[in-house]
Amino acid sequence: MPPNMATENSTNRAEEFKLLANEAFKAHKYSQSIDLYTKAIEVNEGNAVYWANRAFAHTKLEEYGSAIQDATRAIEIDPKYSKGYYRRGAAHLAMGKFKDALKDFQQVKRICPNDPDATKKLKECEKAVMKLKFEEAISVPTSEKRSIADSIDYHTIGNSPRSSYVSLKVTGVAAAVALMAVYVGSKAAIAVATTAIAIVLVVWGTYLLGLHKDSVFTNGRTLDLDVEPQYSGARIEGDVVTLDFVKNMMEDFKKQKFLHKRYAFQIVLQIRDLMRELPSLVDIKVPAGKHFTVCGDVHGQFYDLINIFELNGLPSEDNPYLFNGDFVDRGSFSVEVILTLFAFKCMSPSAIHLSRGNHESKSMNKIYGFEGEVRSKLNDIFVELFAEVFCCLPLAHVINQKVFVVHGGLFSVDGVKLSDIRAIDRFCEPPEEGLMCELLWSDPQPQLGRGPSKRGVGLSFGGDVTKRFLQDNNLDLVVRSHEVKDEGYEIEHDGKLITVFSAPNYCDQMGNKGAFIRFEAPDLKPNIVTFSAVAHPDVKPMAYASNFLRMFS
C-alpha cells in the first residue's frame, strides 16, 4: 500500500473514532468519549482537535489536571488553535486559578479578536481577577482573625442593643482599589471600581445611620433577628433540637420555604461546638446485630437526600449514618442539605457522623455555588460561619477498627498510620499538599503504584498502595467517595476499596445512579443499595455559582 494511502486510511480511522466520541459526549457518556478520543489520538496524535476535545470531556468529569495536560498538548501542536487555550482556561478557572485562566483567555482574544464570545469571557475573567485582588487586599492575616462563631450568641439575637464600628482598613483599601481601577481604565476595572465605591458608601452610610442590621461589621454580633409573629415555619423551643423540629423543617424545605435565620444560627453554632470536640479521625463502634449506613457525595441535591431517608429510614441511634463529605456545591439546594444534616447531628450526635470533603472549603464554595446560595437564602455572616464550621469537620472515620472511611483517598508515601491522621491539625482551609490534602482529594487508579492526579490536586494510587495501608493499620476495607460512578458505586483494588456516590443524575445531566452502603455488625459485610434520581423544583444546578463559571457549565 502506498504511503499516502496508508496515511489517508489512518486519518479516516481517526476521524471515525472522533465522530463516535462526539456522539458519546452528546449522550453525556464522558468516560466513553475519553476512551474514543484516546483511540483517535493513538491513530493520529498530531491532531490538536482530538486533544482539545478530550480535554473538554475531562473537564466534564472534573478531571481538571488531565484537561490542562490535554489542552496544553493541543496548543503545542498548533499554537494558533484558539480552542486549546479556551479549554485550558476553562480548566484553570474550575480549579480557581483565575490568573492562569486570564492569560489563556487573553490569548484566545488575540487569536480571535472579533469573536464576541471570547470577548465576553475575557471581560468576565478580568472582573474575577480584579475581585480576587480586592479580596486579597482587604483580607485579614490568619493570626489576626477572630472567630465569628465566638462573637455570636444566638440566645441574645434580637434582644440586645446594637453596637457598631466601621473597619477603616476595609473602607480605605476599597477606596484605593477604586482609584486604581479607574486609573487602569478598562471596562472590567471600572466595574470593580464601582463595586469598591459602593462598599465605601454602604459601610459609611450604615455607620452614620446606625443601621448595622445583619451586617458583618456588627460588634458583638447582637443581630436584630427576632422571630416575627407571622413566621409560620419550623421552630426550635429552647436549646434542644428535636425530631419534630427536624421533620417540620424538612417539610418546609420540600415546599421551598426558608428556615428563620434565628434557628439557622442556633443549628450551625451548636454544630460548631460539637465538631470542635471531635478528633480528626473518629472511631465508630457498631454493636453486634446492629447496622450502619455510609453515604457519599450529596452535592446540594436535597430531594435525593430525602429519598435516601425514605428508602433507609431517618437517622437515629438505632439507624446511624455517616455522610462522607461534599454535602454542598453544584446542586442548588445546598443550604437545605447542610441544615438538615447539621440539625440531625444536633438532635442526636450518635445518629449521624459527618466527614469533610474537598468541597467543604472556601475556595470551592466561592466557585461552585454554595457561597452565593448562602448569601441569597441567609446572609453574608453565614458565609463566614459555615467556612469556620467546615474547618471543624473530622477528616476520616474508622468503623469497628476494620473499615476506613474517607472522602478522597490515600497518600503519596507509605507507612501512614491512623495515629498520623489523628494528629493532623485540621482547623484550617485545606492545604495544597500533605496528608490532609490527600485525604480530601486523591483518587484510586487501576494500575499499581502512584501517579499524578487527574484533578490536578492530590494523587492517584493503585491497589498495592491500598493493600499496604490496610495491612499497616490492621484494616479490612477502604470506603471513599469523591467520584461520580454510573451505578452509584464501584468496587476496586481486589475488593479492598469501594467508591460510593449518593448524588444520582449528578448536576441533572450525568444519568448516574446514587448508592449507599449498609454494614451489618459484627462481620461488616457491605450491602450496597442503589437508587435513581427523584424530581425536584425547576432550579438548575449551579444556579448560585459565579456568573463566569456558569458560562462553561
Image (spheres, helix red, strand yellow):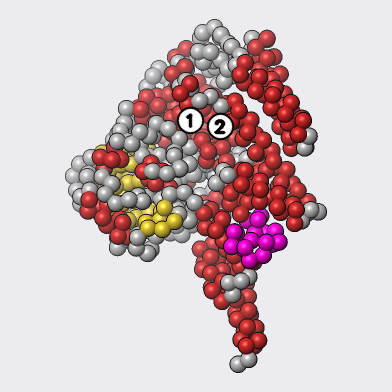
Is residue 135 shown left or right of residue 398? right
**Residue 291 appears anywhere in the view:** no
Which secondary structure, mark 2? Answer: helix
Q: Position of residue 276 (x, y in %)?
A: 35, 27
Q: Position of residue 32 (x, y in %)?
A: 52, 66
Which of the two labelled residues, at mark 2 and mark 1, occupies the earlier sequence position? 2
Tell me if residue 182 is in the magenta stretch. no
Q: Main secondary structure of the magenta part?
A: helix
Dividing the picture into quadrants, the one containing residue 309 is top left
Label drawn at residue 302:
none
Q: Are the two marked residues, 2 and 1, in contact with CB atoms closer than 8 angstroms?
A: yes
User: As shown in the figure, which amino acid type bears the numbered disc 2?
Assistant: Val
Above/below status of 247 relative to 478: above
CA neighbours of label 2 inside 10 A, class few (<14), some (14 to 19), many (20+): many
Residue furthest toward the top?
161
Question: What residue is at 74 percent from the left and 37 percent from the top?
Answer: 188
Instruction: Check disc 1 and report the residue beneath it.
Output: 386
Label drawn at residue 374:
2
Q: Position of residue 229 (x, y in %)?
A: 55, 16
The magenta segment? 71-87
- Return the residue nearer the eye: 269 or 445: 445
